[in-house]
Amino acid sequence: MASKMADLESSFCLVGRFIAFVPGEKSPYQMISLDVSLGDSSAEATHYRIVLDKHLRRMMYRYLNPQDWLKVVGHRAMNLRSGQLEWKAAEIFKLSAHQVSAYRVSAYQTSTHSLPAVTLAAKASAPVRVLICQASDCRQRGSEAVSRALKEAIAQANSSQANSSQTNSSQTNSSQKIMVQSTGCMKRCKEGPNVVTVPGGQHCQVSLEGAITLLQTLL
């Protein structure tokens, strides 16, 4: 069991804008809300909720202001009961505008040159899971339609790749490595439809168009 949990854990380093503290059962400062976009400020942001240890809560509640740029380092792990990724901060640093600009250039270069090879290697070894909340609030906001659109798009991709593979027997059908699964509540009811990709991250307010865009990044 310990080795299985270790396989589901990984470190992360995120740079984004601090939005607000998010209360939890133990503290009004139990989590932070962080918006992260890659490459340039016009890119669509991905929303993260990151848990703070007690020592970080005491340090950060007077230190952080909305729209501060932060670098957050920590660990993420899959909660096997809820089926969602949980992010936990180990260190938080404020960044200057110059530091943010330097990071964006580095992140863009990494995303366009290094990450695709890593992503393809991961796909070859294990399927990507797309978890879609189907609790009542998310369903009211269209999560059923999002799930249906993803499954239909994957089926179309499978059909297209099957036709192409007739002329190239070595072609890999990457869409068969993507699994769409329904989950219970992800505790972000006002931000639905909520989607988590494993590996990947959390996505809130996913529209039908956003779902297809997300799928294209996974294929």
Image: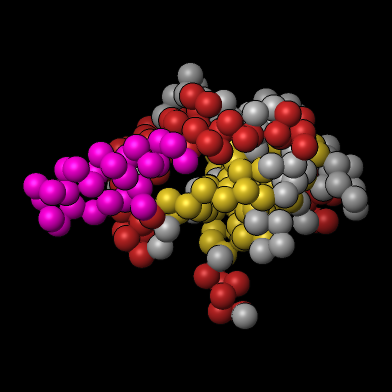
The residue at 18%/52% (across/down) is: 171
User: In the image, 148: left or right of 50?
Assistant: left
Residue 104 in view (yes/no): no
The spot of residue 149 in percent (x, y) is: 49, 33
216 or 85, nearer to the observer:
216
The residue at the point 37 percent across, 59 percent down is 122
In the rendered image, residue 20, in percent from the top left (x then y), is placed at 76, 32
Residue at far left of view:
167
Q: Quadrant of residue 77?
A: bottom right
Looking at the image, residue 117 sits to the left or right of residue 35; the answer is left
Span colored in magenta: 151-176
Which quadrant of the figure has residue 147? top right
Q: Which quadrant would the N terminus be assigned to in this image?
A: bottom right
Residue located at (35% from left, 47% from top): 175
Q: Is residue 154 visible?
A: yes
- Assign the C terminus to one quadrant of the image: top left
User: In the depicted view, which residue is nearer to us: 110 or 204?
Assistant: 204
Question: Main SS type for the magenta part?
Answer: helix
Residue 165 on the magenta span: yes
